[in-house]
Image (tube, coloured by chain):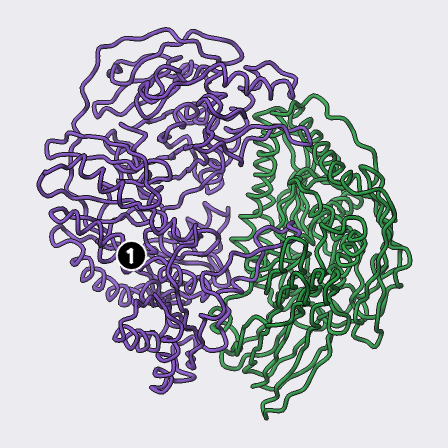
């Protein structure tokens, strides 16, 4: 399951590999309602199912500032760290700079008399009297939830642990920084801990409600990293689920590409207001440099690059005379002009004008498209541009594509990867209408459209491995790998112990990596912990920054361990094929109208069909331009390839 | 000095769509250069404080795109390119290095590199980047001293070729490294800068190969015209008139107090003239700003005032004419000391400009922000780690309140925007222990909207050290607009024996191990009653 702002998607696969899809409107006032109704609809009385849930409950609590009443306990003298942050303003040219509003106001920040040093030695001990004082103070503050983050607790967790035990004994829900991430950089660790305290009580109630109604089934929650965790863990460490929506899509893309033997991918997920891109070089890339509503979160998440433009983005001419697309979006209401309510031209309207969308086939015919209205909206813009309607529509597409191309270059070329060696995986409602053009601009030869591209996030959640991750700051200069491995071994033991609680059966795999930099740098590169540590680091540094330096000392900053259990493989059954039929459809391409074929997806077979073709299915539309061919793989996924004979 | 003020050129041959597509492509190149530089650099000033910028120039040396994370770089790199071209003919594979404030630079720690971009035998443009290095020699660690002349501030580099035909001039490099305190770090930073140049040149060449030289060149011109038009639009929103204001620097650290800065702004529809006539002559201590710094402050203010995102390039600057009297504290002449002009005087220039504009558009301009970067530089020998250390930080303050609401607290304002160094990094690497780091409650000026609060930061130095503080707004407070001014800042020491003493706004001193240094930064001004 995947809950989005507008729809909640469900995908169910039975033992025989039969796949059923269900989509229903989300119920933001009570997210559990849509989830439970959808489950009833799909599962009925069936016996035990494994359910994985991509949840936006924690995400929305933060974005809408509707989380718990948190009290934060810090080292005395550092109570305002959460307000000071990194002391930066987000927009340098703002007349009225604003940092994000802290989740905890001044009155609920409490300093604790204790102090550790960077090597873990105690400078000021935490006394019993202080524990009592803090406990009494908390009672007056009416805390729903408590966050504890002391300086240097990654090096010595003693003080945090003693205080947490005392408060848990008093019945408080407590989030403790070293338990979540034993990693240096106090503000980011504090922010992560406070976010957890802010969303955990809400998540716990929500999941308890779901669990009570899904008794016979095994419920798990998707994390931002693309791995799944139990309801118990997700209730306690809810901060791990903040980005689970887009994560499901990437997992889905990787898994479906694997069916046709592709493991090096660029993913393109184009929705209504934004587009997500990511690059996968065999493994799903994770990072810990992200934020929600500008609040940093040091929990591993899939490395996804987001552009503020999608199908609903509005096009306009600005005061300097340039055509801009986005960031304003027509959203779900009024939506693009062609949906019948809006009047401003959007990317989707341009797609309609150019014949990339087939009006009668949109959402399987469930929603009608007003072509004339789309033309009128684009015509207004065309007048300002002194162009004809198709020229303006083409312009909108070129501009929105330029933004997406920039994002795709940023994650590939700019990080030392050659996109020509990768396949583009296109999903989400609008991506298929732009994917081939984007592939062409990066000289990529292959585009893949998975089965059911409109619900890939839900399908991906189903495939997610059970997974837990750990980090420990070590900060060692030119270390012996054997010494590091001793520390890593104890982290792996913890991983094995805790992951057994998540799933009783299945083989546990662990992987260990190190965050490495040249001594004196501030950004680390993650490489596998092995004897080749230094070589691997230098290779990565060379690829990313164009040089490396064998003379320079390296510093291993953090060790990371991921423990996982693979899901039992399910082979999806290929949907029934429909009789091949096609209609003639007019498509504007390369500056003129061409006769394209309109085909419904199930009618495609393993036989290559040459573009121009517009392929429609319930949840998406795909455009195959001239110079490209399309066929259905044995798995049912669509494979679109550039003809090799000509350059373009 | 008169800069800018030329008339708008019409856009030729590039339609609104192509314009926006190239806007994406060219700014992406500048940004990519920035990522390479920042991530592989070694100076805290570059990697944490983001005190660097990367830019692309057309074949005439006009800036077409810039990626900057702090405004003090805005508009000052074009002068570096001009200075490099004035001295050298640049062939393929050449790189010019410079930091001379009187020949294309800002202050000595800012090192700029400039390289031409060739496709075949044709020069299609230039790439440049500037980064604040941790040390370039001179009388005190960090090269931000309290000095009387430029020679004391560090090694001065006029535009020199550091790379010739792709080969590094090892002799020159050795001479440069021998004059800085942490040579190894300098070398790492310089490599990072050269890597960024290389990436920029590669991408620009690829763009030309793909889209054609004429088209790229036309797009570069059109993009400048676009920014010029946007800036002119923004300026048209100001009522026509003459608006003037003044404010003062506390002093130069050598006994000279109350240094006056005056500005007269003449708005003329889509153009504006900014005149600093009446500003005090340059002074002995290093609060003198050179021309590049003053221009950056002026461009910053008008860029903020424009409600639209303007791509930073040469066109953006054309509608703004700046007159700064030579030999004044806003256009210092050789051999003035200038280290603090960049970090302190630049802030006061912004304050003066906003104050003048508050007469033109009273509802839009905020009250004064803290108006100082609270520069703290430390250095010495760390016995526990048996090595030299050198550290530099700037501390945030309160932002001015405005019609829109209270001023933000504990935030970097105007010409600067660095992150702080994490306490857990600081204490692990240096003989320092942070005693407190809090918001300085009640320091923002009262008003219908309150000014933002400053910061209260205290650090214990656990090793003997030399300390330099360059701070402002210890006497003249950040003004309110109808509301109260923000509280002045304060610097105080606690000696190892427990005795406390106040220290001046600008000072260099030797301290014993165990001394605590507490800096209370100014709050922002309040807004109406």
Q: Residue B282 versus residue A442: which sits nearer the camera? A: B282
* Farthest bottom residue in view: B497
Q: Chain of mark 1?
A: A
Horizontal and vertical percent position of residue B2: 87, 46
Q: Secondary structure at mark 1?
A: strand
Q: Is residue B66 visible?
A: yes
Q: Horizontal placement of B55 versus A181: left or right?
A: right
Horizontal and vertical percent position of residue A263: 30, 36
Horizontal and vertical percent position of residue A452: 28, 28
The residue singled out by tag 1 in the image is A469
Q: Horizontal placement of B95 versus A216: left or right?
A: right
* Farthest right residue in view: B278
Q: Residue B225 versus residue B473: which sits nearer the camera? A: B473
Q: Residue A595 versus residue B210: which sits nearer the camera? A: A595
Shade representing chain A: purple
Quadrant hosting residue B119: top right
Q: In the image, what residue occupies the spot 16% across and 47% down?
A: A214
Q: Residues within 10 Å of mark 1 (few under 14, many from 20)?
A: many
Which chain is drawn using green?
B
Image quarter (top left, top right, bottom left or bottom right) of the N terminus of chain A: top left
Q: In the image, what residue occupies the spot 44% across and 25% down?
A: A434
């Amino acid at each position: 399951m995947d809950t989005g702002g507008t729809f909640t998607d469900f995908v169910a696969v039975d033992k025989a590999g039969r796949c059923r899809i269900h989509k229903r409107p989300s119920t933001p006032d009570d997210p559990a309602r849509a989830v439970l109704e959808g489950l009833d609809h799909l599962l009925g009385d069936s016996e035990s199912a494994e359910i994985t849930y991509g949840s936006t409950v924690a995400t929305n609590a933060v974005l809408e500032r509707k989380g718990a009443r948190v009290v934060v306990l810090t080292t005395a003298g550092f109570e305002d760290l959460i307000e000071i942050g990194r002391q930066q303003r987000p927009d340098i040219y703002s007349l009225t700079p604003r940092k994000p509003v802290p989740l905890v106001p001044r009155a609920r920040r409490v300093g604790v008399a204790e102090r550790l040093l960077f090597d873990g030695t105690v400078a000021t001990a935490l006394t019993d009297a202080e524990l009592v004082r803090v406990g009494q103070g908390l009672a007056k503050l009416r805390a729903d939830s408590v966050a504890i983050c002391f300086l240097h607790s990654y090096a010595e967790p003693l003080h945090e642990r003693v205080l947490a035990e005392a408060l848990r004994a008093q019945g408080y829900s407590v989030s403790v920084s070293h338990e979540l991430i034993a990693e240096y950089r106090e503000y980011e660790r504090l922010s992560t801990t406070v976010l957890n305290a802010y969303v955990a009580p809400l998540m716990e109630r929500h999941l308890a409600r779901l669990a009570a109604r899904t008794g016979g089934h095994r419920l798990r929650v998707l994390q931002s990293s693309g791995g799944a965790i139990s309801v118990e863990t997700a209730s306690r460490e809810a901060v791990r689920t903040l980005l689970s929506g887009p994560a499901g899509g990437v997992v889905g893309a990787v898994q479906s590409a694997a069916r046709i033997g592709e493991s090096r991918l660029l993913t393109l997920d184009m929705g209504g207001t934004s587009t997500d891109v990511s690059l996968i070089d065999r493994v799903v890339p994770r990072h810990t440099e992200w934020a929600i509503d500008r609040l940093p979160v040091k929990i591993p998440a899939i490395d996804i690059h987001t552009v503020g433009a999608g199908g609903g983005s509005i096009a306009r001419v600005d005061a300097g005379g340039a055509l801009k697309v986005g960031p304003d979006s027509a959203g779900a209401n009024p939506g693009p002009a062609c949906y019948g309510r809006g009047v401003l031209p959007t990317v989707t309207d341009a797609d309609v004008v150019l014949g990339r969308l087939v009006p009668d086939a949109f959402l399987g015919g469930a929603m009608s498209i007003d072509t004339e209205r789309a033309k009128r909206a684009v015509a207004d813009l065309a007048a300002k541009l002194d162009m004809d309607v198709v020229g303006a529509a083409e312009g909108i597409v070129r501009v929105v594509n330029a933004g997406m191309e920039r994002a795709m270059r940023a994650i590939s070329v700019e990080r030392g990867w050659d996109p020509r060696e990768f396949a583009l995986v296109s999903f989400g409602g609008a991506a298929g209408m732009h994917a081939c053009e984007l592939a062409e601009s990066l000289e990529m030869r292959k585009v893949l459209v998975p089965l059911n591209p409109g619900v890939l996030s839900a399908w991906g959640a189903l495939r997610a491995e059970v997974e837990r991750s750990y980090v420990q700051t070590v900060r060692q200069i030119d270390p012996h790998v054997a010494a590091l491995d001793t520390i890593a071994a104890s982290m792996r033991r913890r991983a094995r112990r805790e992951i057994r609680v998540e799933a009783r059966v299945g083989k546990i795999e662990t992987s260990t990596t190190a965050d490495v930099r040249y001594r004196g740098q501030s950004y680390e590169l993650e490489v596998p912990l092995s004897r080749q540590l230094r070589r691997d680091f230098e290779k990565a540094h060379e690829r990313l920054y164009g040089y490396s330096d064998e003379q320079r000392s390296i510093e291993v900053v953090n060790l990371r361990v991921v423990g996982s259990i693979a899901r039992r493989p399910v082979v999806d059954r290929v949907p029934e094929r429909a009789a091949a039929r096609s209609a003639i459809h007019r498509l504007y391409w390369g500056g003129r109208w061409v006769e394209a074929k309109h085909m419904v997806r199930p009618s495609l077979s393993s036989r290559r069909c040459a573009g121009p073709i517009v392929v429609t299915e319930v949840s998406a539309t795909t455009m195959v331009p001239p110079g490209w061919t399309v066929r259905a793989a044995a798995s049912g996924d669509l494979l679109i390839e550039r003809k090799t004979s000509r350059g373009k | 000095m008169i800069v800018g003020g030329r008339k708008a050129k019409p856009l030729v041959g590039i339609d609104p769509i192509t314009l926006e597509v190239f806007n994406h492509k060219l700014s992406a190149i500048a940004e990519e250069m920035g990522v390479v530089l920042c991530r592989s650099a070694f100076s805290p000033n570059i990697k944490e404080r983001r005190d660097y910028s990367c830019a692309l120039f057309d074949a005439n040396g006009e800036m077409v795109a810039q990626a900057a994370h702090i405004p003090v770089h805005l508009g000052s790199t074009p002068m570096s390119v001009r200075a490099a071209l004035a001295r050298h003919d640049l062939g393929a594979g050449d790189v010019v290095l410079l930091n001379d404030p009187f020949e294309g630079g800002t202050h000595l720690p800012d090192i700029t590199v400039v390289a031409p971009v060739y496709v075949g035998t044709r020069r299609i443009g230039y790439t440049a980047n500037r980064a604040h290095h941790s040390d370039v020699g001179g009388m005190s660690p960090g090269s931000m001293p309290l000095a009387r002349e430029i020679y004391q501030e560090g090694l001065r580099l006029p535009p020199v070729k550091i790379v010739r035909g792709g080969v590094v001039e090892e002799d020159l490099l050795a001479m440069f490294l021998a004059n800085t305190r942490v040579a190894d770090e300098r070398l790492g930073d310089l490599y990072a800068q050269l890597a960024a140049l290389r990436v920029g040149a590669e991408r620009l060449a690829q763009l030309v190969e793909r889209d054609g030289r004429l088209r790229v060149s036309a797009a570069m011109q059109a993009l400048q015209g676009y920014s010029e038009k946007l800036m002119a639009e923004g300026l048209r929103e100001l009522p026509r008139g003459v608006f003037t204001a003044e404010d003062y620097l506390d002093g130069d650290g050598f006994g000279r107090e109350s240094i006056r800065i005056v500005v007269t702004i003449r708005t003329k529809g889509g153009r504006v003239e900014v005149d600093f006539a009446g500003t005090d002559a340059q002074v002995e201590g290093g609060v003198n700003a050179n021309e590049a710094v003053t221009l950056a402050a002026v461009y910053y203010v008008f860029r903020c005032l424009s409600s639209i995102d303007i791509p930073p390039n040469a066109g953006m600057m054309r509608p703004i004419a700046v007159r700064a009297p030579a030999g004044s504290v806003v256009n210092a002449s050789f051999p003035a000391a200038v280290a603090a002009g960049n970090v302190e005087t630049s802030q006061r220039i912004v304050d003066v400009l906003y104050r003048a504009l508050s007469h033109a558009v009273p509802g839009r301009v905020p009250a004064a922000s803290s108006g100082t970067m609270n520069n703290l530089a430390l250095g010495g020998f760390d016995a526990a780690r048996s090595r030299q250390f050198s550290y530099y930080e700037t501390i945030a303050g309160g932002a001015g309140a405005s019609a829109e609401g209270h001023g933000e607290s504990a935030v970097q304002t105007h010409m600067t925007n660095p992150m702080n160094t994490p306490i857990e990094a600081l204490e692990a690497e240096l003989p320092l222990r942070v005693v407190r780091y809090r918001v300085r409650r009640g320091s923002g000026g009262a008003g219908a909207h309150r000014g933002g609060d400053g910061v209260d930061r205290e650090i214990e130095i656990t090793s003997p050290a030399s300390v330099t503080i360059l701070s402002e707004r210890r006497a003249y407070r950040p003004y309110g607009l109808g509301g109260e001014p923000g509280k002045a800042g304060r610097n105080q020491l606690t000696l190892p024996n427990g005795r406390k003493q106040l220290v001046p706004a600008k000072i260099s001193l030797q301290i014993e191990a165990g001394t605590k240094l507490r800096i209370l930064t100014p709050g922002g001004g309040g807004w109406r009653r």
